[in-house]
Amino acid sequence: MKSKKSAPGPPPRFVTNFIKMLVAPHLREEILGDLQERYYRRMQQQGAAKAGRRYWLESLAYLRPAFIKRQKEAFPSTFLLDSAMFENYLKITYRTFFQNKLYSIINVAGLSIGLAAAMLIMLYTKDEISYDQFHEGVSQIYRVDRKIIKSEGIAANSGYTGYFQGSRFSAGVPEILAFVRLQQAQVEMKMGTEIQLQAVSLVDSNFLSVFTFPLISGNAKTALLDPGSVVITEDMAQKQFGTTDVLGRTIFLKDGKGFNPVTVTGVAKNCPQNSSIKFQVLRPLNVSASEESVNENWFRFFLNTFVVLAPNTNVQTLNAKMQKVFEADAAESIKMIREKYGLADVGLSFFLQPLTEIHLSENVPASDGLSDAGNPAYSYILSGIALFILIIACINFVNLMVARSIKRAKEIGIRKAIGGNRNQLIVQFLGESFLLCLAAFVLAILLVQVVLPVFNQLSGKALALSYLVDFKLIAGYIILFISTVLLAGFYPALIISDYNPVRALNARFTLNGKNYLQKSLVVLQFGLASFLIISTFVIFSQFDFLTSEKLGYDDSDLITIEKWSTKHDQAALFKEQLMKNSNITGVAFKNNGYSGNTVKVNQDQKVNITYETIDASFIPLLKIPVLKGRNFSRSYPSDSTHSVLVNEAFVKQAGWKEPVGQEIAFFDTHEKYRVVGVVKDYHFKPLTEKIEPQLFTMNPGSDYGMFYIKIKPGSETSSLKYIAETFKNMFPLDSYSYGFKDQENLKSYEAEGKWKQILLFGAILTIFISCIGLLGLSVLSAETRTKEIGIRKVLGASVAGIVASLSRDFLKLVLIALLLAIPLAWLAANKWLENYPYRIALNGWLFAFSAMIVIMISLLTISFQSVKAALANPVNSLRSE
């Protein structure tokens, strides 16, 4: 017969816990004892299953008010958030704060700076990702982009399209509900006797219906229907008329050879700063019937085309439909281009890009007539800096709270000895962290208000405090605050509440093994600071290289004047007038901007070039060396029609050993030229771009657009006055403005200069917060070693020896941080420099210098308290102990 006895086991744990939770504490032990005694007896006699069932039933019998009702205690246990206890916590926090002003200030100051940095970055990021979101129906607005596959297989994307893409795609693809074209132009505007060059946006008449740019006066649907109409912004209205009540007023815009009146039919609110489309003057875009009939317009690109899609349209499917429309509608032109240039495929396709993705796009950025193209890398860099600063501030908080807890060991011991449990201590210390974080948070908001103008200047933004009043941003701040409280307060609360009360009351408490965490945090803190400092030095060195490297030509005392479409005879007369002034030593002309083209060399080899039209004075005036052959000369009449100069990059790509005398044929016109000279490569574009093959002609059919005027040093004022008067006399209907070439070159590196400043501030903040944390730790270290220092001095230790003793441990941590940070910084710097075709070489001195800076700042921070402790009278320290 099978025995009913089984091995003893515990009663059902769930039922036991249930009884513990519900039954009154003063009856709990007795009831559980009786239940378990009967359970074990039945288990031996009747088996585990029956004992378990009886255990369940008997337990349920105790669920009566008589057993559940709590007994009033003489010394009741305090609830975690009891009001009296909460008041007590506040008093202790208040006293602790003012009894330890230095640490409290370090904690609050460090956290507030970290939080302020994080808030500013959140503002910046919110602005970046909010670009163009303000348009109604923005999810349906796309830009038509194009991709060109070159013969070398290289793909080039662009946002520029032409007259046809909007109208032809809209007619051939039903999902396209509407289209708008936007062409940027520089037009001379006349108000009274003043003539100024004004940016004008030429748009289709439905522009104000598709995009949300509200009018403060005028009708959005009809304002741009009349070819003689103009819509201006309120700022432009104030500037030109002194009021925004200007409907029906007249503006004179240059059209052709004269100024024509246009009527103001609408005044728009100023464009939001987070808009890729920015305008001051809107005019109707008129496409003539003859232009509409030219099928080759499919291949002329100079404006932006936006389309409005039907809801829920599949964009990929639509891209394929657009390509079919293009191939069918442009078949005639495609065939002609293939035959003319001997191409198997024109390599052109079109695709759609959401309006909201243009600002931060790396594929096709907002550069083709649109404003403020963003770089997502900058957002990542800024976010990284803010995160570094916040982490370092939190590390300060954790380190100082834990280290400072040694001083509060007796308080914790007493609380535990009189019945305080761990949860209450966690709540108390977490509450202290919360209050300190709250103070830091309030201070951070004030800091944001103070530094916002500086931040705007550095980042090139116009962020306003009104941005703070945003639901998502407020939610972000709350999450940031709670995260900071938990990150900075939870760990210290856990560590402090876990102290052994006996050891704490005996004043024998030390952090022992927990010091490893503290040391690790210090290493992490200084590692981040060192990484940022090294990165700052690298960017400074690269910026210095960009702005000081020789460009290969002389840009000093060189004045530039932009003048569109200047005939060669007009330019010659202007030069003759200018040269009458003895302060002007030379004048040269070239076309405006840089034109791209393709030429054929060695019969079939194609070379993509930058094509320039210059006069014979251009090369000598800019002191560009002619390495082979000769410069253009009026002594050779054929120079203006059959001769070209090329640069070294051109010769290298063509593979010529004897370039002078070689023949060059233009790819599109088949015009042939002969090379008469080779000029040394010079940086006609910023050093952020590689020198490309360059070709110069004196083509008389190509107008000049830029004047270069060399003046004597120190004669700027009188020379500029004479140049302006001469220009006005020669070109009375043109706007006049000038620039100095060397200053214009420096403007090319504004982005690098801006990020140099931002990174410098970030590095200063991180090292500052790291150092105030180190200062706090060194003060605590000196306090805890007061007796040791006194004994050492009595035994004859020198001040230098004591300082070295106190500083050694911290210095080791800083050195470990540097050893970890330097390789990471080298990798990051090397990766960043790969973006520049001309860059500095990373060398050991740069890292050694950065490391020295970090060590010196750390030593100064530590030594401040170490020297003070070493100079103290040992009698006082020993007496106090």
Image (tube, rainbow, N blue to C red):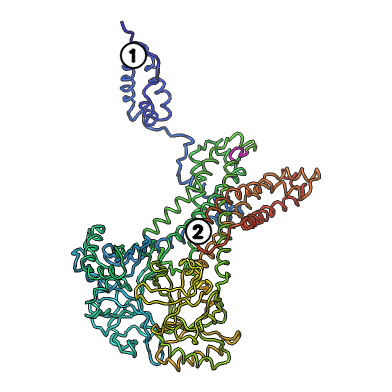
The percent position of residue 672, horizontal first and vertical second, equals 39, 76
676 vs 262: above or below: above
Residue 280's mark? Answer: none
Secondary structure beneath dot 1 equals loop
Q: Earlier in the sequence, mark 2 or mark 1?
A: 1
> Would you identify the image quadrant in which residue 610 lies?
bottom left
Q: Given contact means CB atoms under 8 Å apart, are the residues at marks 2 and 1 in contact?
A: no
The percent position of residue 519, horizontal first and vertical second, equals 60, 44
Tell whether position 513 is magenta: yes
Give the Cα separation between the discs numbered 2 and 1: 78 Å
Q: In this orientation, does residue 871 appear?
A: yes
Secondary structure beneath dot 2 equals loop
> Would you identify the image quadrant in which residue 224 lies?
bottom left
Residue at horizontal 29 percent and vertical 72 percent from the top: 162
Q: Residues within 10 Å of mark 2 (few under 14, many from 20)?
A: few
Q: Residues in magenta? A: 510-515
* Mark whose residue sits in front, 2 or 1: 2
Amino acid type at image mark 1? Gly
The percent position of residue 75, horizontal first and vertical second, equals 49, 36
Residue 834's mark? Answer: 2
Amino acid type at image mark 2? Glu
Dominant secondary structure of the residues highlighted in magenta in the image? helix
Which residue matches tag 1?
47
409 vs 538: above or below: above
Q: In the image shown, does 194 or 807 lie closer to the viewer?
A: 194
418 vs 762: above or below: above
